[in-house]
Amino acid sequence: MSQLAPILPAASRSARMALMLALACAAAPALSDSGAVPPERSGEQLVKQVCVQCHGTGANGAPRIGDAAAWKSRASQGLSGLTKHAIAGLRKMPPHGGKMDTSDLELERAITYMVNQSGGHWTEPIDRARPPKERTGEQIVQAQCHKCHEKGVNGAPRIGDRKEWIRRAGPGLDSLVRSAINGHGGMPARGGMANLTDAEMRAAITYMFQTSVKHPTSP
């Protein structure tokens, strides 16, 4: 505040605060044209842009992408362990792979990608600061649920079978959602779509129930 006094000697408190805000905004990182923060790169993108320079050929002792044996021992350290090495640097590998503008999340994604390209089955982490927008029931059904519920595969209640959906929902919608989350019989937990949230599961089941009750089709 004392530094701003010469600039606005007779200014009100609100005017000084406005100036401080303007200065802060001027120093803030620029946003994209849409006003949104640029999205984090995927693991594949970062690997192809940076990591492949050493991990593509095994230069400087880096585990080569595709070398299952080399990555198996490293994967046993877990994602957090490997990420710590990548952030701090290890032997001839500089911190952040030599690209200091790379975020920790991008490193986690790149490591996951290389592990999976070398025989692993890891899941690429999401940006927990900016989690994906929840999908609608219709979107989920079209992406996954229709594979069994459209034709009643393995005894799944067919979309449009009004009588069967009413019977299934008899104990209450909550119990139906809980059963789908847990999985039962031939249906895997969350319908085999592990990244579905509880709210998305409810939306998908509600969509199939309402569609079947309002617009039933012949068996």
Image (cartoon, rainbow, N blue to C red):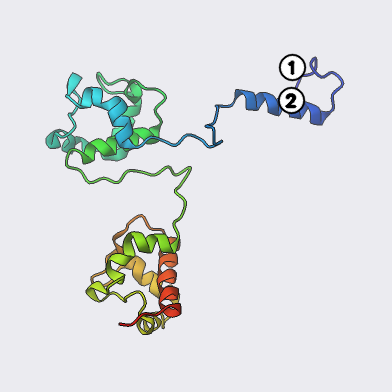
Q: Is residue 85 visible?
A: no
Estimate the x, y position of residue 203 in percent, counting from the top left.
45, 65
**Label 2, on which residue?**
19
Q: Is residue 36 visible?
A: yes
Counting residues from the N terminus, which is met first, the one under dot 2 or under dot 1? 1
Q: Amino acid at mark 2?
A: Leu
In this rendering, which labeled residue sits more in front, label 2 or label 1? Answer: 2
Q: Which mark is residue 85?
A: none
Q: Amino acid at mark 1?
A: Gln
Estimate the x, y position of residue 210 in percent, counting from the top left.
45, 74
- In the rendered view, would you say 143 is above or below 15? below
Estimate the x, y position of residue 177 in percent, counting from the top left.
40, 70
- In the rendered view, would you say 126 is above or below 204? above
Label 2 neighbour load within 10 Å: few <14, some 14-19, many 20+? some
**Label 1, on which residue?**
3
- In the rendered view, would you say 125 is above or below 210? above
Q: Is residue 201 left or right of residue 61?
A: right
Q: Write down the quadrant of residue 150 in the picture.
A: bottom left
Q: Write down the quadrant of residue 127 in the picture.
A: top left
- In the rendered view, would you say 41 is above or below 178? above
Identify the residue at horizontal 32%, vertical 43% (top origin). 124
Check whether the beta carbons of the residues at disc 2 and disc 1 lie within 8 A of each other.
no
Estimate the x, y position of residue 167 in percent, counting from the top left.
37, 84
Identify the residue at horizontal 19%, vertical 19% (top origin). 60
Q: Is residue 22 left or right of residue 51?
A: right
Label 1 neighbour load within 10 Å: few <14, some 14-19, many 20+? few
